[in-house]
Image (spheres, helix red, strand yellow):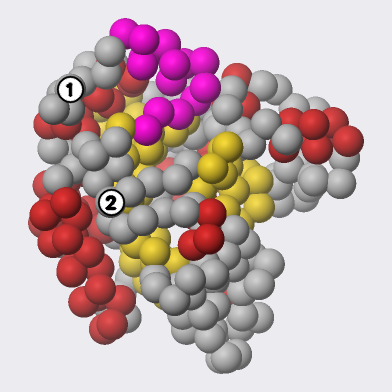
Amino acid sequence: MIADRFSSEEVAQFERDGYLIVRGMTPRATCAALKAVAERDLAAQQNPVEYEADTQYPGAPPSRDAPGGRTVRRLLQAYARDTGFAQWSTSAPVATRLQQLIGPRVELSQAHHNCVMTKSPSYSSVTHWHRDIRYWSFERAELVSTWLALGEERLQNGCLLLLPGSHRMTFKPERLDAAQFLRPDLDENRALLDTQIAAELAPGDVLFFHCRLFHAAGRNQTAETKFSVVFTYHAAENHPLSGTRSAALPDVRL
Ligand SMILES: O=C(O)CCC(=O)C(=O)O
């Protein structure tokens, strides 16, 4: 039996580590239904999508016209894409836990994540160590994302890697490169990278993670696409800054 909310110990754990995994939070049948929608839209390349070539990450095809350039990396606008994603993202098990982490009035940002990650076996790229907040603009850097695994997520297919507690750390600018990725060539960063954990997930597991938590991911080295549904939330009082990309789409009140 899965508890319908976090225990006080789990809330404290989230504050300390910057992430929490709820095992089996979403029923397998729901995952199968969402995966069928994602597979349908992936096969049709149903817009809006982001291609691997667009990421310009290491290992990505150099352009959309290069071999593998039109490999879909993200099915964007998941909330508006299908009622199944919208329902999951605002469902009671998600909302109750987010209220515990964020506060009573939670909103979903349609401007960030709000996608199905589709990590393909053939042309997947490497995501270096970063904080999601680096390109987001809110009054406070206090947002939480949910990552629902629709299938197995293991090191072999490029599951997320996390640096526990890094959401509370401050970094001198020189520890990051121009694109704000953590520089692995520096000794002080290497010591931190030694603390990494792999967020291995089974279908239905949900990872909650803080927008300041450093994370990374490897390539998919299996024969099957990895599907993950990812949404981002903030307190209604924590507004996106007007005129920025974070304010480009209306937020959805849970
Ligand atoms: O699955 C991956 O490669 C990681 C994606 C990621 O970290 C992100 O979109 O912020």
Quarter placement of the N terminus = top left
Q: Main secondary structure of the magenta part?
A: helix
Residue 179, labelled with which disc?
none
Q: Name the spot of residue 200 as percent of width and height, x first.
A: 45, 45
Classify residue 153 as left or right of residue 8: right
**Residue 125 seen in render:** yes
Of the pair 231 and 10, the residue shown nearer to us: 10
Q: Left or right of 45: which side holds 190? A: right
* Residue 26 on the magenta span: no
Q: Upstream in the sequence, badge 1 or badge 2?
A: 1
Q: At 79% across and 45% down in the image, what residue appears? A: 183
Identify the residue at the far top of this view. 8
For disc 1, the marked residue is 3
Per the rendered image, the range of residues in magenta is 8-21
Tell me where residue 106 appears, x and y as whole percent: 25, 27
Residue at horizontal 54 percent and vertical 42 percent from the top: 198
Q: Picture coordinates of residue 104 (x, y %)?
A: 22, 16
Q: What is the CA distance from the residue labelled 1 to the residue labelled 2?
A: 18 Å
Observer-nearest of 236 and 97: 97
Residue in the image at 30% along x and 32% along y: 22
Location of mark 2 (residue): 203
Q: Tell me residue 235's x, y (percent).
A: 32, 24
The secondary structure type at the circle numbered 2 is: loop
For ligand 1, tell me if the residue under mark 2 lies within 8 Å: no
